[in-house]
């Protein structure tokens, strides 16, 4: 079996292209998501309708996150990819069909329960909402639960495509989900002038249709790779029992994380109106660099590390070290940009219509609080993939449970005092307290993941000297950004944002190069050349 250490340059180059394909697909998806959020902000701002939408979307998203991409990636891809590596295509197809059959049965049952139990779930988790917001949230939840089921099936398709190194289509498919919702808002909100209450319900139906479109886009590629498979419910198929054993620790870990997200929104429901909405807007931006850089590396490496598990831990340690360095190269400046220029970014993306200057400051406060934990959250994605490649899904799950507990305790302690601080006319900063708790907990999670992974694969990571030089390059970029911001002050946000961030980015890249920590141009584009006779990993 080919290992990471002795793989030929062509094989290694294919892996780098895989990371690049993931990054490009995620970039397009995130751009579409930002456009959707801007259109949403234009119509709803941080109103009660925005709060209801965020709360309703969060509840079925638990189904998606529990059974979707992250969980399937940890339990399904390692086994399926290993069967492919052993050239057991028929066994792989039977395994994929059995997993799909189990998913269909499980999703059907959970969707029915979610639709019927919607009033009780909303009353339990969002008791802080007034009756109008609760009723609207219930109506939306009943539409969005079937949507979440479709997105879980889309995640199964993603697992198949990733294992066959078809990365781009699976990560660009959410673009169609976003476009469907954008079209719904523009057509019904602008041209047909729906009321806010009717428009947000129509948006729910648009999201359901978009979920079906996202799945349909991937299925032709899946059927081409698995021409003879059939969904079936069977535990006797090779690999199914092991996948289930691996599945439950991840399910427990993600269940705790999703319960935390639910509770964050539930706690925010007791704060001033708009707190739930501002959390949602800030999380959209917070997840953008994580998706582009950390997830692109982790998603493309997991199938390959799973293929080479038998080669020992040294190849995994080398790849984890390279991945952490590259994640830091991108996430440290992302953190600085959000901390120092987050208000500019939020204004450029969201400030329109019902989303004004006050909403911008409120969302910026939450984003800055999330940014403090951004490097830790991103590095933890990479480390979790290393655990999954080692067929250890329990350790990340247990550590995630600890992170969630810390996040909730700190967030609950901070949110009410901060909610006494006013921003603009009516906005409050209570939601930023929840974000601060999440950031502190992210650093604890990273420390524990690295500590325990060191016992499994040995030393990994990169030198403190390189880290300090990356931070110094980021500080230089920030200084240049502040100079540009001073020159552009008073102009429209759509001019200020690129006029500030472009000099910031150029100064950062130039400083990093001069300090000897810059990535080569090929690495930035996903085609790097480096040591061991072949290209080094890059997102």
Image: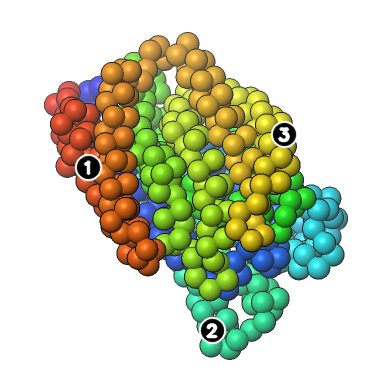
Question: Which mark is in front, 2 or 3?
Answer: 3
Contact, CB < 8 Å: mark 3 with mark 1?
no
* Residue under the image location 47 percent in, 11 percent down: 455
Q: Circle 3 sits in a helix, a strand or a loop, which is it?
A: helix
* Residue under the image location 39 percent in, 20 percent down: 310
Q: Circle 1 sits in a helix, a strand or a loop, which is it?
A: helix
Upstream in sequence: badge 2 or badge 3: 2
Upstream in sequence: badge 3 or badge 1: 3
In front of the other: 302 or 140 = 140
**Number of numbered discs overlaid on the protein picture:** 3
Q: Which residue is mark 1?
A: 507
Q: Which residue is mark 2?
A: 190
In front of the other: 398 or 35 = 35
Give the image quarter of residue 334: top left
Give the distance between the C-alpha atoms of the residues marked 2 and 3, in whole angstroms. Answer: 42 Å
From what the image shows, is residue 95 above or below residue 473? below
Dot 2: within a 10 Å radius of its alpha carbon, few (fewer than 14), some, or many (20 or more) residues? few
In front of the other: 300 or 58 = 58
Give the image quarter of residue 255: top right
Upstream in sequence: badge 1 or badge 2: 2
Q: Which mark is residue 379?
A: none
Where is the C terminus found, in terms of image quarters? top left
Q: Is residue 83 visible?
A: no
Where is the N terminus found, in terms of image quarters? top left
Q: Which mark is residue 413?
A: 3
Q: Which percent across, then down, holds residue 377? A: 49, 34
Q: Which percent across, then down, holds residue 172? A: 40, 58
Give the image quarter of residue 43: bottom right
Q: With 51 as the anchor, is 31 left or right in this view?
A: left
Give the distance between the C-alpha atoms of the residues marked 3 and 1, in whole angstroms. Answer: 39 Å
């Amino acid at each position: 079996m080919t290992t990471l250490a002795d793989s030929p340059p062509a094989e290694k180059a294919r892996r780098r292209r895989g990371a690049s394909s993931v990054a490009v697909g995620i970039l397009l998806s995130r751009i579409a998501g930002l456009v959707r959020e801007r259109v949403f902000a234009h119509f709803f701002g941080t109103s009660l309708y925005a709060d209801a939408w965020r709360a309703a979307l969060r509840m079925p998203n638990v189904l998606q996150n529990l059974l979707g991409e992250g969980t399937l990636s940890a339990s399904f891809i390692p086994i399926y990819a290993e069967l492919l590596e052993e050239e057991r295509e028929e066994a792989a197809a039977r395994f994929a069909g059995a997993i799909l059959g189990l998913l269909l049965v499980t999703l059907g049952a959970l969707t029915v329960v979610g639709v019927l139990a919607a009033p009780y779930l909303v009353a339990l988790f969002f008791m802080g909402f007034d009756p109008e917001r609760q009723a609207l949230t219930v109506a939306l939840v009943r539409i969005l639960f079937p949507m979440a089921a479709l997105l879980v099936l889309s995640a199964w398709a993603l697992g198949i495509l990733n294992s066959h190194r078809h990365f781009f289509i699976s990560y660009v498919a959410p673009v169609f989900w976003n476009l469907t919702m954008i079209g719904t808002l523009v057509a019904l909100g602008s041209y047909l002038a729906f009321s806010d209450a009717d428009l947000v319900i129509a948006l729910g139906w648009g999201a359901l249709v978009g979920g079906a479109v996202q799945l349909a886009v991937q299925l032709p590629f899946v059927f081409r790779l698995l021409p003879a498979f059939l969904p079936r419910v069977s535990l006797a198929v090779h690999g199914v029992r092991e996948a289930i054993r691996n599945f439950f620790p991840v399910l427990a870990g993600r269940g705790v994380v999703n319960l935390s997200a639910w509770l964050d929104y539930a706690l925010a429901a007791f704060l001033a109106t708009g707190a739930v909405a501002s959390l949602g807007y800030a999380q959209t931006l917070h997840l953008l660099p994580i998706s582009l850089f950390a997830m692109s590396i982790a998603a493309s490496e997991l199938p390959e590390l799973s293929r080479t598990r038998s080669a020992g831990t040294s190849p995994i340690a080398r790849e984890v070290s390279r991945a952490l360095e590259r994640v830091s190269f991108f996430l440290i400046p992302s953190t600085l940009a959000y901390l120092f220029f987050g208000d500019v970014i939020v204004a450029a993306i969201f400030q329109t219509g019902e989303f004004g200057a006050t909403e911008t400051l409120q969302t910026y406060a939450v984003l800055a609080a999330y940014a403090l934990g951004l490097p830790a959250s991103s590095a933890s994605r990479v480390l979790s993939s290393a655990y999954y490649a080692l067929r250890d899904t329990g350790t990340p799950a247990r550590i995630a449970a600890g992170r969630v507990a810390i996040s909730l305790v700190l967030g609950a302690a901070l949110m009410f005092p901060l909610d006494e601080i006013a921003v603009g006319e009516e906005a409050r900063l209570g939601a930023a307290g929840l974000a601060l708790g999440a950031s502190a907990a992210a650093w604890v999670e990273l420390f524990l993941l690295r500590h325990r992974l060191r016992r499994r694969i040995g030393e990994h990571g990169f030198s403190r000297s390189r880290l300090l030089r990356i931070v110094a390059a980021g500080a230089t970029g920030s200084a240049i950004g502040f100079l540009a911001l001073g020159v552009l002050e008073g102009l429209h946000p759509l001019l200020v944002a690129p006029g500030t961030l472009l000099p910031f980015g150029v100064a950062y890249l130039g400083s990093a190069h001069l300090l000897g920590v810059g990535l080569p141009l090929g690495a930035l584009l996903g085609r790097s050349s480096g040591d061991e006779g072949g290209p080094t990993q890059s997102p």
